[in-house]
Image: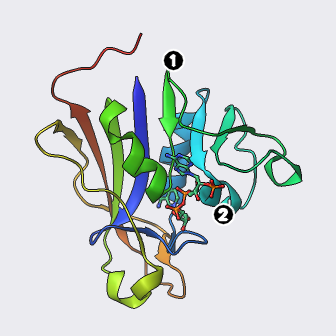
Amino acid sequence: MIGAIWAQSVDGVIGDGQGMPWHMPEDLRHFKLTTMGNPVVMGRRTWLSLPKKPLPGRDNYIVSSRNPGEWSTGAFVLPDVPDLATDTWIIGGARLYDSVMDILDVIEVTVVDAIIADAYGDEAVFAPPVPEDDFALMKDSDWLQSETGHLNGSDVPLRYRFLTYERKVPKDHV
Ligand SMILES: NC(=O)c1ccc[n+]([C@@H]2O[C@H](COP(=O)([O-])OP(=O)(O)OC[C@H]3O[C@@H](n4cnc5c(N)ncnc54)[C@H](OP(=O)(O)O)[C@@H]3O)[C@@H](O)[C@H]2O)c1
């Protein structure tokens, strides 16, 4: 099973190039529960954006043309997306998601109830659209109210929603 996991605003924003636009503890718990124990693969910019690295309890892989060094301590650096044979989670960012859509079996999306693309302007980094021809929505939590989750620079608690998409025609990963 190859999965991708991300959190996006209603209008598709996942970040500003440096970090995420919100702090959402429920999503962080969901991310941890979903990925724990499995390898995680990320682009260089996502690695650099992690407040604590490497992510514990998971082998961390960074896709980058750069040589490993001090910057990558605690992770494995790969020049390309590897052939993935075991259960693995692709954890971003946008550039990496775009390049792996064809090999995904599962997509876990957290939707944060905010519209922020205009506010972020050119800095906005967007999730790829989930291709509806290839993926079916299998689970939808409906809107849930976060206790403390909020946009950066705001203290208004936000709603969020967990969506699980699965590939309609399963692919074989040998
Ligand atoms: N909301 C969420 O769930 C979520 C999740 C993850 C990230 N984010 C946000 O997304 C933003 C970062 O995303 P991003 O799209 O700017 O960067 P990214 O995909 O994390 O990293 C881009 C870099 O990774 C390498 N790379 C990515 N895909 C590659 C591929 N297919 N083949 C070879 N190299 C590849 C390249 O590194 P080199 O230049 O070194 O060759 C590229 O410059 C941040 O704001 C982060 O906070 C949000």
Residue 142's disc is none
- Give percent across and percent down for residue 122: 43, 84
Cα–Cα gap, marks 1 and 2: 26 Å
Left or right of residue 53: residue 8: left
Q: Residue at x 33, y 41 (%)?
A: 101
As drawn, the residue found furthest toward the top would be 174
Q: Residues within 10 Å of mark 2 (few under 14, many from 20)?
A: some
Left or right of residue 166: residue 157: right
- Give percent across and percent down for residue 43: 58, 51
Query: Quick one: SS at disc 2?
Result: helix
The residue nearer to you, when weighing 113 against 41, is 41
- Give percent across and percent down for residue 59: 69, 31
Left or right of residue 89: residue 10: left
Type of the residue with mark 2: Ser
The residue nearer to you, when weighing 111 against 131, is 131
Ligand 1 under 8 Å from disc 2 Cβ:
yes
Q: Residue at x 58, y 36 (%)?
A: 40
Judging by the rendered image, the residue that carries numbered circle 2 is: 49
Examine the rendering and report whether any part of residue 161 can be seen.
Answer: yes
Q: Is residue 157 above or below residue 142?
A: below
The residue nearer to you, when weighing 115 against 30, is 115
As drawn, the residue found furthest toward the right would be 70
Query: Quick one: SS at disc 1?
Result: loop
Tell me if label 1 and label 2 are in contact, CB under 8 Å. Answer: no
Which quadrant of the view contains residue 38? Answer: top right
Judging by the rendered image, the residue that carries numbered circle 1 is: 86
Type of the residue with mark 1: Thr
Colour approach in the figure = rainbow
Ligand 1 under 8 Å from disc 1 Cβ:
no
Q: Residue at x 16, y 36 (%)?
A: 134
Examine the rendering and report whether any part of residue 116 can be seen.
Answer: no
